[in-house]
Image (cartoon, rainbow, N blue to C red):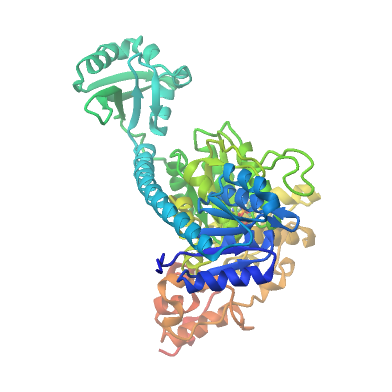
Amino acid sequence: MKELEPGAAILVIDDEESLRNTFQFFLQNQGYSPVVTAATFEEAVREIGTRRYDLIISDIVLGGHTGIDVLKRTRELGLNCPVVMITGYPTVETAADAVRLGAFDYIPKPVDKETLLKTARLALKQYQLEEGQRRAEQERERNRAFLETVFKSVTDGIVTVNDNLDIMELNPAARLLLNELYPGLVDQRSIVPMCGLHTFSSLKKDLLYVLKTGQESTPTLCECDIEGGRKKVVSIAIAPLKDGAGGYEGAVMVLRDLTAPDPPQSGRRKQFHRFLGASDAMQAAYTLIENVGRLDLNVLITGESGTGKELAAEALHQESHRKNRPLVKVDCTAIPETLLESELFGHRKGSFTGADRDRMGRILQADGGTLFLDEIGDIPPMMQLRLLRFLQESTFYPVGQDMPLRVDVRVIAATNVNLKEKVQAGAFREDLYFRLRVIDVILPPLRERGEDILLLAHHFINEIAPKIDKNISGISDQAVQLLMGYHWPGNVRELKHVIERACVLCPGPTIATDHLSKEISHPVLPPVATSDADTDEGSQPHMAQPAAATELTPAECILQALQKSGGNKAKAARLLGIDRTTLYRRIRALQIDLSQIDT
Ligand SMILES: Nc1ncnc2c1ncn2[C@@H]1O[C@H](COP(=O)(O)OP(=O)(O)OP(=O)(O)O)[C@@H](O)[C@H]1O
C-alpha cells in the first residue's frame, strides 16, 4: 500500500554512494518528492539552509562528523523536521543517545526497506501533526505580534498595573510621557509615587476603584508642570485588564497628551543629528525619523549608496528610548560569509576549528539597544533564516550552544538594493523582508535635493580646508553650475570626495572648474531611454547603473531628451529618469537654450 505524503521533501545523508542512491530510488518510488542526497556534513548543511525538508535521514557516521552534528545544526537553524539516524550495530548506543538528543528514531544497518518506510511514514505523520500545532501557535504569535505592534506604535501611552499598583507593561509612548510627568518613575516600576503628586490626587482612588469593582473609571484631565517651566495636560482613563477567562488581573491606564502642540518651527532645519540639508525631501526625512525613532519597531532604511543610511540609523537610535544603550553596527558585506554567523550570534569555545574561546556576538552586545545591519540585501540564505528566527522569537543560539539566549534588541537594517525585487526574484526571504520592514525610511538621492548640494559643498570646504592649511572661501559660478548639473551617482559621499580633491588642488581662495574631476566637468550620463516603457514608474532608471553610457555632456543629454519628447518637459524628465523639478534646475544651472529644440 502506498501512502503518499504529497510534497514531503526528504534529505538523505550518507557518505556511501550506493546507499544514498538506493534510499533515494526507493523513497522516490514510494512517491516522496523531492528526495535529495548529500554525501558530507557540509553538503547537508548547505542543503538544509537552502530549502525546507520534512524529513532528514542521516547516517550516524559521516567522515569527521556525525549524524548528531546534523541534528544539532538542524535545531540551531530553528528547524523542527524529524531526523532519523541510520546506524551500524556497533554504534547502537550512540544512536540511542541521538534519540535522547532529539532524533526521531534510529534504524540499524542493514536497513530493511519496510522498516525504513514505516519509520519515514511515522516521522512524517507526527511532523505533520506537530506542524499543524506549530502553525496554530504561529498564528497566535502573529496575532500577538500584531497587537504588540499596535501597543508599541499607538501615540497614546498605555500602562498596565497589578493589584499592588506595580507597573507590569508600558508602551514607548507611555515611557516618554511618564518620563516627562515624573522623571524616574518608570525605573521604580510602580505607579504609587505618581499618585502622591497633588496633580494626580484622584489617580490612586480611581485605580483602586477599577481594581475592586472591575468597572471603568471616569476619565480625568490633569494639568501638570514639567521641566523647563512648561505645562502638560493629560487625560487618564482606567479600565480593568481582562484575563480572557471572564476575570481581570489588574488595570490598564490610557494616557493621552492633550497639550496644545508647540507653534510650528520657524524656518526649516538645515541640520538634524549628523545630517545636513534644508531641502523639502530632507525635511520630510527628518520628521519621519523623529516620529519613527521613538516607536520601538524594526525599520528598513533604503537609499542609494552614500545617501546617509548610516546617519539615519544613528539618528533613529538617538531619537529612541534606547539612546543611552549601545548602537551596534554590522556591515553584513564586510564580513566573510563563513564568519557572519559567529559575528552576529557569537560562538562557544571549540564549536569550530579556530574557535579557541567563547565569543560574544553582536546581537548580545546590542542587548537593550539597537542593532544596525547594513547591506542586509546581501546576506546568504542560511543567515536570512537564522535572522528570521531571531526576529520572530527574540532568542538565538550562539554557534555550538544548545541553550537559547533572550535579548531585547531593536533591529534597524539598511540596503541600497531593491529588496522587493530581490524577494520577487527569490533571492531574499519574503517573511524576513516583512519582519525587517515594519516601517521604512527612504532617503532621497542627492540629485533630487538641489539646494543641498551647495549647502553640503560649503560645509565640506569649511571642514576640510583648515585641516590642510588652506584658506578657501568660495566656489566660482561656473564650478557651481557643474556641481548643480551633475547627477551624483555616489551621492553625498561622492560630493565629499569631490570637495576634498578640489580643496587639495585649489591654490587660492576659490574652487574653480579646473579643480573638479573629469566626471564632473565632462560627466558621462545614463543614456536617454528610448520610450516611456523604459522608464515605468517603479523602475527608477537613475538608480540603476547605466547599461551603456554615452559620452554626451549633461546639457547634450537634456537637449536630446527634450528633442525626443517634442519639448514636453515631464516626458523628457521621465526619459532621463529624473523628476521634473530636477530637470528645471539643471536647465537653469546649465543655462540650456531651449529655443534650439524643434517642437
Ligand atoms: N545629509 C548628509 N549630511 C552630511 N553628511 C552626509 C549626509 N549624507 C551622507 N553624509 C556623509 O556621506 C558619507 C556616506 O554616508 P553613509 O555611510 O551614511 O551613507 P550610506 O547610505 O550608508 O552609504 P552606503 O550604502 O554606501 O553604505 C558619510 O561620510 C556621511 O557622513
Give whichever of 113, 3 is nearer the camera: 113
Residue 574: % across, % down: 44, 76
Please state, as top left, top right, bottom left or bottom right, where the C terminus lies in the image.
Answer: bottom left
Taking the image as shown, residue 261 lies to the left or right of residue 437, namely: left
| Residue at image location 53% in from the left, 49% down from the top | 78
Residue 407: % across, % down: 55, 36
Residue 84: % across, % down: 56, 55
Residue 54: tell me if it is visible.
Answer: no
Q: Residue furthest bottom?
A: 598
Total marks placed: 0
Please state, as top left, top right, bottom left or bottom right, where the N terminus lies in the image.
Answer: bottom left
Taking the image as shown, residue 573 lies to the left or right of residue 591, namely: left
Give whichever of 94, 63 is nearer the camera: 94
Q: Quadrant of residue 179?
A: top left
Give whichever of 33, 478 is nearer the camera: 33
| For residue 444, above or below residue 574 | above
| Residue at image location 66% in from the left, 63% down from the top | 14
Residue 584: % across, % down: 46, 71
Residue 75: tell me if it is visible.
Answer: yes
| For residue 363, above or below residue 47 | above
| Residue at image location 57% in from the left, 38% down from the top | 404
| Residue at image location 50% in from the left, 63% down from the top | 114
Taking the image as shown, residue 268 lies to the left or right of residue 331, namely: left
Taking the image as shown, residue 408 lies to the left or right of residue 154, namely: right
